[in-house]
Image: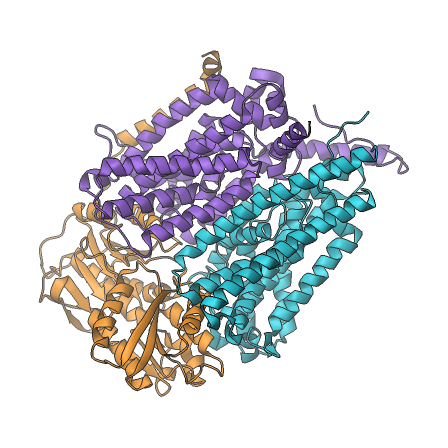
Amino acid sequence: MDSDLNAMAGNAAMTPEHIAGEEPGPSPGASGGWGRLRPAMRWESGLVVVVIVIAIMGSALSPEFLTANNFFNLGLNTGEIAIMALPMALIIISGEIDLSVESTLGMSSALLGVLWADHWPMLAIFAVVAVVGVLAGAVNGLLVTRVGLPSLAVTIGTLALYRGIALILLGPRTVANFPAFYTNAGTTAIPHTDLPWSIGIFIVLAVIFAIVLHTTPFGRSIYAMGDNAEAATFAGLRVKRVKTSLFVISGLASALAGVLYTFRLNTAVQDNGTGLSLDVVAIVLLAGVSIFGGKGSIGGVFLAVLAFAGLQNALLLTNFNQEATGLVTGGLLLISVFVPNAAMFVRYLRQAARRATRRPPSEPALSLPRKDT
Amino acid sequence: MTATLAPPREPGSPASASSRRLAERVFRVREFGIVAVLIVFVAITAAIQPRFLSITNIQFVLVDATIFALLALGETIVVISRNVDLSVGSVLGISAFLTAQLASQAHGLPLPLVFLAGLGIGLGFGAINGLLVSLGRVPSLVVTLATLYIIRGLDVLIVGGSQVVPSSYYPSFLTISKATVGGIPDLAIVVAVVIAAGAYCLRSFRSGRELYAIGSNPDAARLAGIPMGRRIFTAFALSGAIAGVAGVLWASRYGTVDSTAGASYELQVIAAVVVGGVAIFGGSGSVVGAAIGALLLQTINSALYVLGVSPDWDQAIAGFLLLVAIVLDRFISLRLTVSLRRRSARRGQ
Amino acid sequence: MRALLRRAPLAASTLVVASALAVAACSSSGSSTPSSSSSSSGSATAKTGLKVFVIPKNLGNPYFTTADSKGTGGALAAISAAGDTGTETSGTAATSASQIPAIQAAITKGANALIVSATDPTALCPTLNGATKRKITVVTYDSDAPTCRSLFINQASTSAIGTSEVDLLAKEIGDSGEIGIVSAAASATNQNAWIGYMKQELTKYPKMKLVATVYGNDDPATATQVTQGLLEQYPNIKGIISPTTVGILAAAGVLDTAKYRGKVQLTGLGTPDSMKKYVSDGTVKAFELWNPANLGYLAGYAAADIAGGSLKVAQGATFKAGKLGTFTIGADNTVLLGPPTVFTATNINNFNF
């Protein structure tokens, strides 16, 4: 009995409220398939508008914006972040978070450099890097699900730990003599297209993730446990197994991103990837994935990557003061959380005003605040 | 018949006296635990390299730790209420630059006014965070992530390519971090007093205990009539104000301030806070523990340099320690849940 | 499957957006060419009105702001004096991943010449080689990317910097004792090159011993801490060399106490403005630097001349760089600004940067 309660307490500790710190509004997913779809459609439609606006703005400000060459560069610089955003979206939908992705990227890059400098064959290196990525994700997943730790704290710890391992592996060295076959893949397009290889991989992965998330029971279970982990457990879903596998996928994706990153720059150095975790989280939040869990779509992630990359690129091409791009990213993030809340907030204000004028001041504070339907 | 789950840690709720005492005893054990780790660590390092305990080195470590201890104080207040403030590094940076400019251009300005300016700047940004979180009902992770970007962007815009250099300050500004009393840096004493005061306020004032309640169980806190919005707003405002003061100290300590001051500090601060025993979900922990956590992490940092161990190991050790700390906390809290529940069951509650 | 079909409207709109962008991309010109046609070879009439982009390691870095700005007489001043338009751009983190998008954007915007201070000796090469293929002039300054540029403007001969630092310190500590180096980032090309020459020069002083090189990463807090650690680990240390403006400031801050002043000597590369305090109170006796603005100015003229066609890069070729005079291209296609200036208490107040 005690152990069940403990297990529940453990899972309760992982419900989305605990990450976000506040109670969520009404859960639109509660009314089933169409109910979940409608608000998602609203968000992604908004994103489509944003992307179109950015495209128009960009091309108005700079004639080179809408060129194939520019898209190539844009894709090149965003490929790795985009790949990491896919599993990150799934993790956040399931009610967790993974801040260690940049360090797993760095660790795999360092491993690649060290093993290459030691004359290992490249295919063997790929195998090792993949295994390490899986292990890195597994550590996160097991600590969160088996030990019951909050993913925010765990992944801050592994963020430092994995970066530390990268530092120890490489030290101050730089490894920069990777074979042209691979580094070309980092700078030339897929034949007959204008896409960098990393974006090609991203598109393929996005389709796979979309199919899994939106059509399979596995994907539906991710939404369910993001909505309410306790209920999901009682409904028979294997919350722990699914969440662990999500972290493992994230680790593997970050390792892949690390390899792509290293080849693109033809450099393995200890600070590869620093700062990327927050960029990935920002993209996923922009995609309409709710930090509370239970909401979001891969289409949104795709559009958010377009918007994020497009915006940064457009700003670079204009005479915008590069030093202020942070302002734009942060502002976008704020807008992305306020817009859905705005409607709710206005309603809340109206209700509060109504309550204040109608209710006599002697009423006890214990009347439950009315929840929106 | 209610079958609600009693949250494992509730120092602020009207639990039975002995349960509270048990809980507090556990916290004290937890704090004692970090102190013990600190002592063991220092002892081992000093055994290998006695110079670690030289007066100058202790002074170095203490002064370097004060800035993080201050940030940890502010962050703890926020984390206890089940929120997080990721913008502290950016606030420190912008405050450091602006107050450094002030100190270098207004030579007649008395020092306390410079500190006040830093406090004001930080308070302003903290208030914005607080408003967005409490009124806008937006999760603090997202808000402070956004303000992290925005404030850093502002900082970079304002600073541009300039920097403030030590030559331009008046001398007393730079010596703040060097003044000592009987060998102990003034800064360390002052910050220790501030932290003690903070701990007292959190424990003894109702508004402080209410923060714990909010972090333990926000729904229950709301039903109990706690003014959540006001408390959370105050928590963020305080966190910002403290980060602002830390910025002034940063400028005085390191002299050169450009647009990168304080970058990436937020994750280090959260690590210190968690290592110090503050639960990331709120509801438990103490500022004293968090300050000791900050001191521990700085000590490890310094020890690595002194031992000649490549500072490359620093991150890995810090990350590992953080993981150990939260695993340990989890086991402690599970044990506590079990025994608290057994106690309640025995009393028929 | 049904769930997928339900999302058909969304998928459709995404597809529409993506294909619209693709069509727009394909219909406009493939890659943008530099705005002026390829220049005639080495004729006396150089092309003007070219677009030159100055890309330092990062923006918001005071050293580069001095080197690049028009107001200080840096790169942008030279470019406009040469009759071209100059723009400064870069990322905000001094990493290659942050610098590359800026280089790409410059190429896309039709740059005729790039002046780059390389964050990494090799990571920029794919991008810079792409620029060279497009007939864009690539000149590096301050920090080199040796295999992917036409010309490198070096602030002073690498060996001269390394050897003079050691000589300066040796004079101050009487040619004997333990010394340490407080450097910047472990991967910085220029740092490692100078340190290499320092180690070579040290062999001339058998009684001096380099006990450690620590890395401050050009961050004041880190540089302070590594200096503290150095002092604690080697209590008998007599001197410190810090060939980075951030590092020397941080080290000076640490040494600026009664305990260390005069007992541990400090030298390195620093700007006179920032070091005035420490020279006047005796913490630092002498240090050196070049004028970053002159470095940028020289780079600006070199790039403008090459892109404009009046300068063909070859060892021995000469060109005039405005107010700085005439310069000759040396070995490895490098141009030297000149010997570093040594600043001491006697002359430090004559300088304003």
Determine the image quadrant of residue A361: top right
Give the quadrant of the C terminus of chain A.
top right
Q: Position of residue C314 (x, y in %)?
A: 9, 61
Using the image as rendered, state which of residue C297 and residue B117 is in the foreground: B117
- Name the residue furthest top: C2
Which chain is the one coloured orange? C
Give the quadrant of the N terminus of chain A.
top right
Instruction: Give the vertical position of C113 relative to C228 (above or below).
Output: above
Q: Position of residue C340 (x, y in %)?
A: 26, 76
* Image position of C216 (left or right of B204): left
Q: Residue B258, can we see it?
A: no
Chain B hue? cyan
Q: Position of residue C83 (x, y in %)?
A: 24, 60
Instruction: Give the vertical position of B77 relative to A298 (above or below).
Output: below
Instruction: Look at 79% across and 54% down and name the residue there.
Output: B205
* Image position of B171 (left or right of C121): right
* Image position of C350 (left or right of B7): left
Instruction: Look at 51% across and 75% down and name the residue there.
Output: B56
Instruction: Give the vertical position of A216 relative to C303 (above or below).
Output: above
Determine the image quadrant of residue A372: top right
Instruction: Look at 21% across and 59% down and name the residue there.
Output: C303
Instruction: Give the vertical position of A139 relative to B193 (above or below).
Output: above
Q: How is the image coloured?
A: by chain
Q: How many marks?
A: 0
Chain A hue? purple
Determine the image quadrant of residue C338: bottom left
Using the image as rendered, state which of residue B246 and residue B197 is in the foreground: B197
Q: Position of residue B142 (x, y in %)?
A: 56, 41
Q: Residue C188, can we see it?
A: yes
Using the image as rendered, state which of residue B172 and residue A44 is in the foreground: B172
